[in-house]
Amino acid sequence: MAPRVIVVSVVVGFASFLVTELMHLVLVPDLGRHWERLLAEGVSAVVVAGLTAGFMDAANQRQQGALLRMQVISEMNHHIRNALGAISLTTDSIQNQECVQVISESVDRIEWTLREVLLRRNPISEKEIDRLRYAPTKNLRLTTYTRREKTHE
């Protein structure tokens, strides 16, 4: 557990103890024996501190998981785009225009996926997933490679 989590949970537990003791003194000063009341408030403070530490640790783990996913996405994006660049450049030596067109459309589809799907921030509905999954490649925004190919025709 991180030192910050420990410090914050101890402070929250101590604050819980003080607030509970203050409430007892103000609202019901003659409730039970003093040492029993302090023991109960101390146990409550320990429970509150433990819950605070648990919640903070879970939040830290979620944050670390999100950071790891973002780093993986960034690395995948970088390496896939580099590979697509090499694939796009090799189409210059291919004489068969149908093959060039198929490769070009596939590169466009992969680049669209990297841009629109991999970096999506919010979940979408199942209907939208199906629509995007089976969308024709002609509706995709053209990449630099496709624009360059169309100008050479």
Image (cartoon, helix red, strand yellow):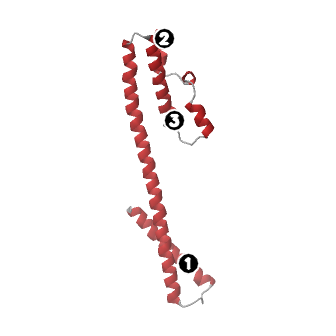
Assign a secondary structure to mark 3. helix
Q: Residues within 10 Å of mark 1 (few under 14, many from 20)?
A: some
Where residue 147 appears, x then y in whole percent? 49, 17
Reading the image, the residue beneath label 3 is 117
Q: Which mark is residue 151?
A: 2
Looking at the rendered structure, the kind of residue marked 2 is Thr
Q: Earlier in the sequence, mark 3 or mark 2?
A: 3
Mark 3 to mark 2: distance in Å? 28 Å
Q: Of discs 3 and 1, which sits in the foreground?
A: 3
Q: Residue type at mark 1? A: Thr
Q: Position of residue 39 (x, y in %)?
A: 49, 84
Q: Quadrant of residue 83?
A: top left
Earlier residue among tags 1 and 2: 1
Q: Secondary structure at mark 2?
A: helix
Please state which amino acid type lies under the numbered disc 3: Val
Tell which of 54 and 93 is nearer to you: 93
**Spatial CA span between label 3 and label 1:** 51 Å
Left or right, 64 with reference to 28? left
Up the image or down, 35 lies above or below 142; here it is: below
Front residue of this view, candidates 67 and 117: 117
Sort mark 3 into few (<14), some (14-19) or many (20+) by Cα contacts within 10 Å.
Answer: some
Q: CA distance from mark 1 to mark 2?
A: 76 Å
Nearer-N-terminus badge (3/1): 1
The residue labelled by disc 1 is: 20
Spot occupied by residue 103 in the image (x, y as percentages of width and height): 44, 20
Report the disc number at residue 9.
none
